[in-house]
Amino acid sequence: MEIAERLTKIPPYLFMELRKKIGAARAAGVDVISLAIGDPVEATPKSVIDELCRTAYDPENHRYPTDEEKGMLAFRQEAARWYDRRYGVALDPATEILGLIGSKEGCHHFILARINPGDVVLMTDPGYPAYRASILMGGGEPWNVPILAKNDYLPDFADIPTDIAKKARGMFLNYPNNPTGACATKKFLNDLVVFAKDYDIAICYDNPYSEILFAGQERISFLMAPGAKDVGVELNSLSKPFNMCGWRLGMACGNPDLIAAISKVKENTDSGIFNPIQFAGIQALKNEEAFIEGMTALYGRRRELVLATLKKIGIDFAPPRGTFYLWVPVPKGMTSLEFTNRLFDRTAIVVAAGTAYGKYGEGYIRISLTLPDDRLAEAMARIEKEFAP
Ligand SMILES: Cc1ncc(COP(=O)(O)O)c(C=O)c1O
């Protein structure tokens, strides 16, 4: 069967490929440890699971979800309270918030809501691979903005050629950043709003790691920048802060015209989020802030262990302070892929090669901290043994 041309432009999804590689090695009896995928292994908070179970028994909730495409008003109201408490951002639940099946869905719908065929959409290199796929599926033209260590992995707007900026209709950004872990500054966000206004570029600020922070890093939302709501939306998610990746729950917040447009896409695509998941989400947002503290403390300890091990094998660097990833420079004289392959072949450890996130990812690998402590300790012992000077 011939498939649509738009799909032929999209490379295979990195993690599907990695899963296949891991599956094949495990089937051959190898004890593979994956440090590649960012998917917390610890359980969702019990109170959240209880709320799902309680509400799942109510036949009212077996019908199409309440307020279908927008998400339940009660969920949107709780998200508004969360944004107010955590970021000092005021949002109108009626017009400025929309429930999502995770922030990944929001990336795709943002493109359908804003981009016409042939429009340029800016994204960063390295960057989250799903942006490119969403842009291409929507008929847009991705344009990569390099993000480099010397600029703390923030785009330099002066590097974007004026003719490209004039053609661009949208831009994806994501800080705390996957894969680099970099965080935005308030100054950067202010400059972003000015850049977006100057060129009429709609911003899709994808912020699912907004709560995963270390070493005194302050929580930052794009919507804290004056004028941000005029130029874009922020996507957020319950996946990472509450270990709810599999539940598929998030939200888009900000510009009411974009929210209405994304809502129209949803109205014609899916029929909303299962009510009990939204009730469970309310419970998480309302009562589980302490859970996030516990998880970030755990990631913080794992981070220290990995950094100490890397130091022992001669990789010494000061990582940025966000996300549960470490963006690690590879040893001198090796490419990302060579180091990744050597790790796999000699230690059965899987990491993501930096080049999977774009050509400026060359020279790095990404290590995820979302695996059980004992497995991480085992992985570090293997690395130390293999690469000890
Ligand atoms: C930058 C970025 N955006 C979005 C997502 C997807 O999040 P969600 O589970 O909310 O769809 C991820 C997941 O890894 C991510 O890294």
Image (spheres, helix red, strand yellow):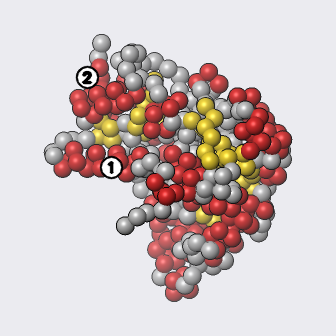
| Mark carried by residue 19 | 1
**Residue 357, image x, y percentages:** 49, 38
Which residue is rendered at x = 53% and y = 44% of the image? 128
Q: Check the image and report above or below for 342 versus 106.
A: above
Asked if residue 201 lies left or right of residue 13, the reply is right
- The amino acid marked with disc number 2 is Glu
List the residue tagged with mark 2: 386
**Residue 363, image x, y percentages:** 45, 24
**Residue 9, image x, y percentages:** 49, 50
Q: Indicate the quadrant where residue 153 lies.
A: top right
Q: Is residue 223 shown to the viewer in this render? A: no
Farthest top residue in view: 389
Farthest bottom residue in view: 59
Which residue is rendered at x = 67% and y = 32% of the image? 155
Label 2–label 1 contact, CB within 8 A: no
Asked if residue 200 lies left or right of residue 365, the reply is right
Q: CA distance from mark 2 to mark 1?
A: 24 Å
Which residue is rendered at x = 30% and y = 23% of the image? 384
**Is the residue marked 2 within 8 Å of ligand 1, measured from its CB?**
no
**Is the residue marked 1 within 8 Å of ligand 1, measured from its CB?**
no
- The amino acid marked with disc number 1 is Arg
Q: Check the image and report above or below for 32 versus 385.
A: below
Asked if residue 357 lies left or right of residue 278, the reply is left
Task: Depth check: give the residue in front, 14 or 8.
Answer: 8
Q: Indicate the quadrant where residue 380 lies.
A: top left
**Residue 103, image x, y percentages:** 58, 56
Q: Indicate the quadrant where residue 215 lies.
A: top right
